[in-house]
Amino acid sequence: MKIDMHCHTKEGSPDAGVSIVEYIEKLRALGFGGMVVTDHDSYDGYRYFKDNLWGKYDDFVVFKGVEYDTIDAGHIICIMPESLKLRILEMRGMPVAMLIDIVHKHGGILGPAHPCGSAYMSFCNTRRGHKVSTMLKFDFVEAFNACESEESNSEARVIANVYHKPGTGGSDAHRIDCVGTAWTNVPDDIKTESELIAYMKNGAIGISCGGELYGKTAKDRLGPLNNVLVQGFWFYNKAGAIMKRHKRKLELKKKELFLRTGR
């Protein structure tokens, strides 16, 4: 079954222009069997699907995920069990070590998105990017991203192979013409987040990924001027992390109680 493991919806990502209905309809037409919704620090896209479209598409699986903005390691894709509500993953700014600990303690998986892409947003181009101990703790690596360059994707594939991590593929689509440009092949019988998590944790036998480069992103259009946007993201992420600090602390206290008591 082909699934797109990196999808941004307009219901959940402020910079995306594709509705989740448009995603589903186009991916189904292209022969995909599913998608992972990975909005920026938000489950709103998946919530819209669950509240308004649940049960409408029996031949297509929508998995819940999130692309989390860490303070020190770029964008990390997280997938949690379907029964779990983890609001802390909608509050940007945790360090990657804390994120890994929380995701794993709650039965989830995570891996770096576009690991060799732009500075600050991509794991290998952050201050944590050369920490072997951190890379070893990831459960997968995004080895093909349609919005990255061939060089970036080639380096990501090398990393996945060196660290013996399953390589995933995702379009990272924010516009309709990018939807369907990347895929990950997983077994047809995977229908829930828990099944996808178990598959990844057990070695992801038979997984493959690939696609075609989109070539129409902002960085493709802007060239060297894209560095201005990259620097702007650094300030935006720092400011967002500071603004969410108090809420993160409150949520972390709740989760610490949960882990201590088993409730």
Image: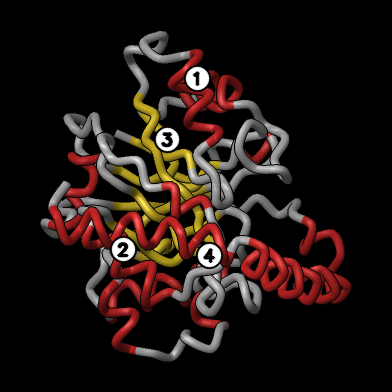
Q: Which residue is mark 4?
A: 75
Residue, x 20% and y 41% (percent of image)? 194
Residue 220 spot, x, y in % from top left? 78, 61
Asked if disc 2 and disc 3 are in contact, CB closer than 8 Å, the reply is: no
Of marks 1 and 3, the one in the foreground: 3
Type of amino acid under label 1? Ala
Picture residue at 37% right of the left edge, 73% below the top: 98
Label 2 vs label 4: CA separation?
A: 16 Å
x and y percentages locating residue 189 in the rendered image: 17, 30
**Which residue is painted at 46% across and 49% down in the image?**
66
Q: Amino acid at mark 3?
A: Met
Up-down relation of residue 92 to residue 132 (above or below): above
Which label sits in the foreground, 2 or 3?
Answer: 2
Identify the residue at horizontal 77%, vertical 64% (top origin): 219
The alpha-carbon separation of the residues under discs 1 and 4 comes to 29 Å
Tell which circle, 2 or 4, labels the residue nearer the N-terminal end.
4
Q: Is residue 196 visible?
A: yes
Res. 67 mark: none
Quick one: SS at disc 2? helix
Camera-near label (3 vs 4) is 4
Q: Earlier in the sequence, mark 1 or mark 3?
A: 1
Q: Quadrant of residue 218?
A: bottom right
Q: Is residue 43 above or below residue 90?
A: above
CA distance for labels 1 and 3: 13 Å
Which structural element holds mark 1?
Answer: helix
Side of 192 where 77 appears, left or right: right
Residue under pointer 3: 35
Residue 245 lies in quadrant: bottom right
Instruction: Tell me if mark 4 has few (under 14), some (14-19) or many (20+) residues whose alpha carbon lies within 10 angstroms of its own.
Output: many
The reply, left or right, for residue 35 in relation to residue 254 is right
Q: Which residue is mark 2?
A: 102
